Image (tube, rainbow, N blue to C red):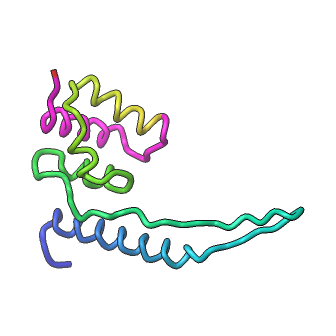
């Protein structure tokens, strides 16, 4: 594959995202189920996608590689500035409550990235 590791990683994220959107569109055909005079019809919708990534810098690879599968960069970048401890709490919540598959090393790098990019009080 041509390009730097960062470029290849960005291409891979974009290709994976495009494949997921295509699969979701294919599966979006309405489905119905009926019982006892009640008919349920499934509905679907398409969420907007974004090619936007987190700005380059130390640990950008950790946040781009772990967080873009659930969050757009724009959504995170428009959050209020938080302290390092508050960012740590947010990352811990993603891992422990929402079961984000993020290694402890990457979680620490994500916290470091966010604390540097959007430092709070």
Magenta residues span 97-120
Q: Residue at x 59, y 77 (%)?
A: 29
Q: Is residue 48 magenta?
A: no
Which residue is pictured at 27% across the width and 23% down the height? 85
Measured as percent of width and height from the top left, residue 99 is found at 48, 42
**What is the residue that sits farthest to the right in this orientation?**
36
Q: Position of residue 82 (x, y in %)?
A: 22, 28
Quarter of image, res 2 = bottom left
Is the residue 29 above or below the residue 66 in the image? Answer: below
Quarter holding the C terminus is top left
Tell which residue pokes out farthest to the left in this image. Answer: 57
Q: Quadrant of residue 41?
A: bottom right
Side (left or right) of 118 relative to 63:
left
Q: Residue furthest top?
A: 121
In-image side of 63 versus 3 (left or right): right
Nearer-the-camera pick, 31 or 110: 31
Q: Which residue ends up furthest to the front in the rendered image? A: 37
Residue situated in front as seen by the camera: 77 or 12: 77
Q: Residue at x 18, y 52 (%)?
A: 54
- Identify which residue is drawn at 67% across, 73% down: 31
In the image, residue 27 lies at what x, y percent?
56, 75
The quadrant of the image that shows the N terminus is: bottom left
Instruction: Where is residue 62? Give x, y as percent.
Output: 25, 48
Work out whether residue 33 or residue 20 is closer to the camera in this orientation and state it: 33
């Amino acid at each position: 594959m041509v390009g730097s590791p960062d470029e290849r990683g960005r291409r891979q994220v974009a290709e994976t995202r495009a494949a997921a959107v295509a699969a979701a569109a294919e599966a979006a055909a309405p489905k119905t189920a009926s019982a006892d005079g009640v008919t349920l019809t499934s509905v679907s919708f398409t969420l907007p996608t974004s090619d936007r990534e987190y700005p380059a810098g130390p640990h950008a690879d950790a946040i781009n590689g772990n967080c873009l599968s659930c969050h757009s960069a724009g959504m995170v970048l428009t959050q209020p500035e938080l302290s390092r401890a508050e960012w740590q709490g947010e990352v811990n919540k993603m891992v422990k409550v929402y079961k984000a598959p993020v290694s402890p090393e990457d979680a620490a790098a994500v916290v470091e990235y966010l604390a540097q990019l959007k430092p709070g009080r």
